[in-house]
Amino acid sequence: QSALTQPPSASGSPGQSVTISCTGTSSDVGGYKYVSWYQQHPGKAPKLMIYEVIKRPSGVPDRFSGSKSGNTASLTVSGLQAEDEANYYCSSYAGSNNLVFGGGTKLTVL
Amino acid sequence: EVQVLESGGGLVQPGGSLRISCVASGFTFNTYAMAWVRQAPGKGLEWVSSISGSTFSGSGDSTYYADSVKGRFTISRDNSKNTLYVQMNSLTAEDTALYYCARGGQYCPTITCPFDSWGQGTLVTVSS
């Protein structure tokens, strides 16, 4: 199973919005509602930010939102803050009892 | 407070075996799906294996594996000890990674559950 495609990097200034894409196929992202996003600061464990495309776990700021169109899912971070600087990974159920992650996007707050 | 704590990592020779563990606390362990996710040095996340919880699957554990480890790794759980395991055999350099234990969900098909709690990981290094 191939990894989902994410841009290696993204950036924005404090207060701005940035969107990170996650492109798969109709066999994974496009075929299921089970897309999640994880935030990982250097040297730390990943943290769940979005699940089932658009849902936000308790405690995650509403500045983080998810969406999907066709085979591409997106994570949007609004009102960028310094602490949002991290690596972000998407994941998707890929059918046949498989789960696939994206390669990760390094978000830099300028 | 939900916590998962991995242990058992270390240096192992190519072709060797290792079992790593994850002790859970702060939640009803047996009712949750659990998983192992690994991260090679400087690389991204890779799902390794998942095991069902009793809430969704009832009695009997269902197990699932990434193609890269199928036939070599075995995931298991001991609900009496709140502990998750993965037995890793025929290890190669490509298995070198930080192995994270992650909690899945209670009310979702195992592989579809998001991972809402993660440990700090245990490092497995395969080298001669």
Image: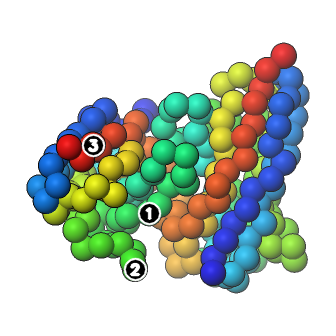
Disc 2 residue type?
A: Ser
Residue A48 badge:
1
In x, y percent, where is residue A8? 31, 32
Residue visible at 74% across and 71% down? B24
Q: Is residue B43 left or right of residue B65?
A: left
The answer to the question of whether label 1 and label 2 lie on touching residues, with beta carbons closer than 8 A, is no
Looking at the image, can residue A106 be seen? yes
The chain to which mark 1 is attached is A
Element under disc 2: loop
Disc 3 residue type?
A: Thr
Is disc 1 on the same chain as disc 3? Answer: yes
Looking at the image, can residue B62 be seen? no
In x, y percent, where is residue B69? 68, 36
The chain to which mark 3 is attached is A
The alpha-carbon separation of the residues under discs 3 and 2 comes to 25 Å
Q: Which residue is mark 2?
A: A58
Residue visible at 54% across and 59% down? B111
Element under disc 1: strand
